[in-house]
Image (cartoon, grey):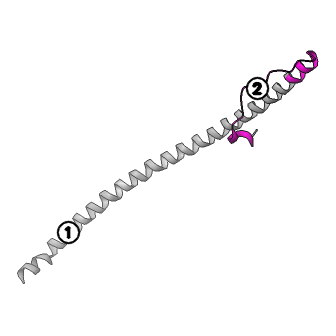
Amino acid sequence: MSYVATWLSPEFVQATGVALATVIGAVTAWQAREVAKLRERVVALEEQAADDKLRFRDAIRLIRALQRHIDELLGFLRLHVPGQEPPVAQYTIPATLQEEI
C-alpha cells in the first residue's frame, strides 16, 4: 500500500504534471517553428509561381510576335523572290505550347 501511496503523493503527481507540461510545451514550440518555416516556404513558392506565370505569359507573347514576324518575312520572300520557296522551318513548336500559341 505504501508503494501506491508514493505514486499518488501530491509531490509525485505535481512533478509528473510539470514534466508532462514541459514535454508538451517543447513539442508545441517545435511544431510552431516548423509551421512558421512551412508558411515562409509556401509564401516563397507562391511568389515564385506568380513570377513564373508572368514570365510564361511574356514568353508566349514573344513567341506569338516572332511567329507573326516569320509569317511576314515568308510573305515578303514569296513576293520579292518569285519561283523560290523559303526554306522549311527547322523547328517544331512543342505540343505543350501548341494550345497557348
Question: Which residue corresponds to the image point at 92% horizontal and 18% vertical from the top-left?
Answer: 83
Q: Residue furthest bottom?
A: 1
At 35% from the left and 55% from the top, the residue drawn is 29
Disc 2, SS = loop
Residue 65 painted magenta:
no
- Write the start and end of the magenta stretch as one range: 74-99
For the point 32% across and 58% down, the residue is: 27
Q: Where does label 1 land, which residue? A: 16
The type of residue carrying mark 1 is: Thr
How many neighbours does mark 1 have within 10 angstroms: few (below 14), some (14-19), or many (20 or more)? few
- Residue 26 quadrant: bottom left
Find residue 97 and report its horizontal and vertical position in percent: 70, 39
Could you tell whether 47 is left or right of 72 in the image? left
Q: Position of residue 25 (x, y in %)?
A: 31, 60
Residues at circles 1 and 2 in contact by the CB criterion of under 8 Å: no
Q: Nearer the viewer, mark 1 or mark 2?
A: 2
Residue 16 image point, x, y percent: 20, 68
| Dot label at residue 50 | none
The quarter of the picture where residue 63 lies is top right
Say if 37 sits above or below 11 in the image: above
Q: Which residue is mark 2?
A: 89
Q: Quadrant of residue 10?
A: bottom left
**Marks 1 and 2, how far apart in space?**
79 Å
How many residues crowd around disc 2 within 10 Å: few (fewer than 14), some, or many (20 or more)?
few
Q: Give the mark nearest the N terminus, 1 or 2.
A: 1
- Helix, strand or loop under label 1: helix
Decide which of 14, 23 is in the foreground and name it: 23
Compared to 32, does 52 lie above or below? above
Q: Is residue 97 found inside the magenta-colored segment of the image?
A: yes
